[in-house]
Image (tube, rainbow, N blue to C red):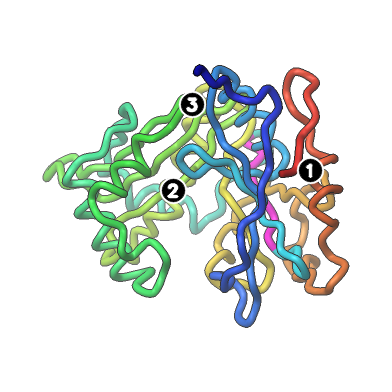
Amino acid sequence: MRHSLPVAPQFYVTAPQPCPYLEDRMERKLFTALQGDGADALNNSLSKQGFRRSQNVLYRPSCTDCAACLSARIDVSAFSLSKSQRRIKRRNAHLERRATSPWATEEQYALFRTYLESRHASGGMVDMDVFEFAAMIEETPIRSRVVEYADESTLELNAVCLTDVLDDGLSMVYSFYKPDLPRQSLGTHIILDHIEIARDAGLPYVYLGYWVPGSPKMGYKASFSGLEVFANGVWCKMRDPEAFEPTLHPLSTAPIAEQVASISLPGGYRAVPD
């Protein structure tokens, strides 16, 4: 018997688990599968509504009593380099960018392990083996690239970013880099270079993932001019990071059925909660 994929995406909710950004909070995600002929259109549409991709899944925070996580993107036309960012670009002028197909290598995995053990030793990805790493890089049903940054003289790999190409920008899915070069600020350099790539390609946005007010892990994202956050269903300009406070009350998140009903899908389909 042949089974065809459902026409309209089905949406599901994960079980609550400890939040990686705010202490004493629990996180929950709304998600749907990314598959079939309409994967690109679905990814483009939901990315503009605060969703992120992880392999063949699109997800968005949907915590029961918290709405602190805000999807963030940089408006390339409104971005200008700060003095510190100019210095970071100069310090990394020796790095050569290499954009390739999403294919995992042993050199990437070695750098990934070093990065995790230094920066996220207690995180959920620390036990990821080489096969799971390869799946993270290679299992993508949409247009993706691996952007590597290597030393021009030694050819040694310093940083990597898995990047999706959307119809309105670049989505930085996951990046990692040498943790023992703090003066180079490699994480910031990767973002600055993606802004340059997007500008050269005529793409208006660089999607950064989530910014969380009150989380030191996410504070660096607020240092980029032209930043926008997706709050209350619309993108708004980040004018003062201090003006955003974590929304932590029982009525901060709409019921799942209401959340799903408000999602716009390509082709005029309606989202369906499971």
Magenta stretch: includes residue 84: no
Viewer-side label of 1, 2: 1
Q: Is residue 207 left or right of residue 116?
A: right
User: Does label 2 or label 3 sit earlier along the sequence?
Assistant: 3
Query: Looking at the picture, which amino acid does disc 1 mark?
Result: Val
Question: Label 1, on which residue?
Answer: 260
- Residue 95 to residue 24: above or below: above
Q: Give the label on residue 142, or none.
A: 3
Q: Residue placed at 76% from the left, 62% from the top? A: 240
The kind of secondary structure element at disc 1 is helix
Q: Residue placed at 75% from the left, 43% from the top? A: 273
Label 1 close to label 3 by CB (< 8 Å) = no
Q: Give the label on residue 174, or none.
A: 2
The kind of secondary structure element at disc 2 is strand
Q: Real-space Cα distance between discs 1 and 3?
A: 23 Å
Secondary structure predominantly adopted by residues drawn in magenta: strand
Q: Is residue 31 left or right of residue 273?
A: left
Q: Residue placed at 56% from the left, 47% from the top? A: 208
How packed is label 2: few (under 14 Cα within 10 Å), some, or many (20 or more)? some
Q: Residue placed at 30% from the left, 48% from the top? A: 133
The kind of secondary structure element at disc 3 is loop
Which residues, given as a range, are shown in magenta?
A: 69-76
How packed is label 1: few (under 14 Cα within 10 Å), some, or many (20 or more)? some
Q: Is residue 222 left or right of residue 232?
A: left
Q: Position of residue 219 (x, y in %)?
A: 59, 66
User: Does label 1 or label 2 sit earlier along the sequence?
Assistant: 2
Query: Looking at the picture, which amino acid does disc 3 mark?
Result: Ile
Q: Real-space Cα distance between discs 2 and 3?
A: 15 Å
Q: Real-space Cα distance between discs 1 and 2?
A: 26 Å
Viewer-side label of 2, 3: 3
